[in-house]
Image: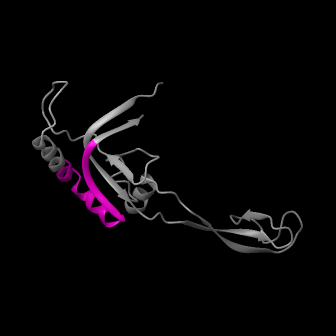
Amino acid sequence: MGISKIIAIEPYIEMTYTPKDIIGTSMECSIHGAILKSDGLPKFCLICGAKLKEIEIKKIQPMNYYALLREVDPNGIYEDSFLWVCKDEKPLIVISGEIGGTDTDRGIYEITPEIIATALRKFREHHKDLIALLRENTNTFAIKFGALTYYN
């Protein structure tokens, strides 16, 4: 198993969103402050026997494309449509890796304005439903064309 460095020259989406915090409940002992998960536990502390009180726990989520996708696409219709690259960068960047701007099989070709326009048009047409879904659920959203490097 190895790691490959990929250089992709294609359309990509750059976006930001506000992650939803995960809110749950736990049980806390008022005597010594032990926090226990509330799932199926008794209402009394297993250590000292004191009555437990229910507390709300809030976990702040980092910005993550796949977490966003689970929120906006719970049935997983689009789960394989885009690949999240540049994970350490903000904003989020995703690519499809499917729609090229040229039909040539040569190893080298000039990237002309026509090639870029064709690639962007095909990208927008091919992913129009997912693009609309992401656009309405993000703070900033832009479709761009460029070179991205990432590892897989």
Q: Determine the image quadrant of residue 86.
A: top left
Q: Nearer the viewer, residue 114 or 3?
A: 114
In this rendering, position of residue 7 left or right of residue 120? right
Q: From the top left corner, tell me how far across and down residue 88 is, in percent.
A: 47, 46
Magenta-drawn stretch contains 139: yes
Q: Is residue 40 above or below residue 115?
A: below
In the picture, which quadrant includes the C terminus? Answer: top left
Q: From the top left corner, tell me how far across and down residue 76 is, in percent.
A: 38, 54
How many labels, in total? 0
The residue at the far right in this view is: 48
- Residue drawn at x 38%, y 62% is 72
Q: Nearer the viewer, residue 6 or 27?
A: 6
In this rendering, position of residue 22 left or right of residue 71? right
- Residue drawn at x 31%, y 60% is 141
Q: Determine the image quadrant of residue 111.
A: top left
Question: How was the colour assigned to the protein in this rendering?
Answer: one colour
- Residue drawn at x 80%, y 64% is 34
Magenta-drawn stretch contains 125: yes
Q: From the top left corner, tell me how far across and down residue 18 is, in percent.
A: 44, 65
Q: From the top left corner, tell me how far across and down residue 135 is, in percent.
A: 30, 63
Q: Nearer the viewer, residue 38 or 141?
A: 141
Q: Determine the image quadrant of residue 15.
A: bottom left
- Is there any visible trace of residue 66 in the rendered image? yes
- Is there any visible trace of residue 130 in the rendered image? no
- State which region is magenta: 123-146
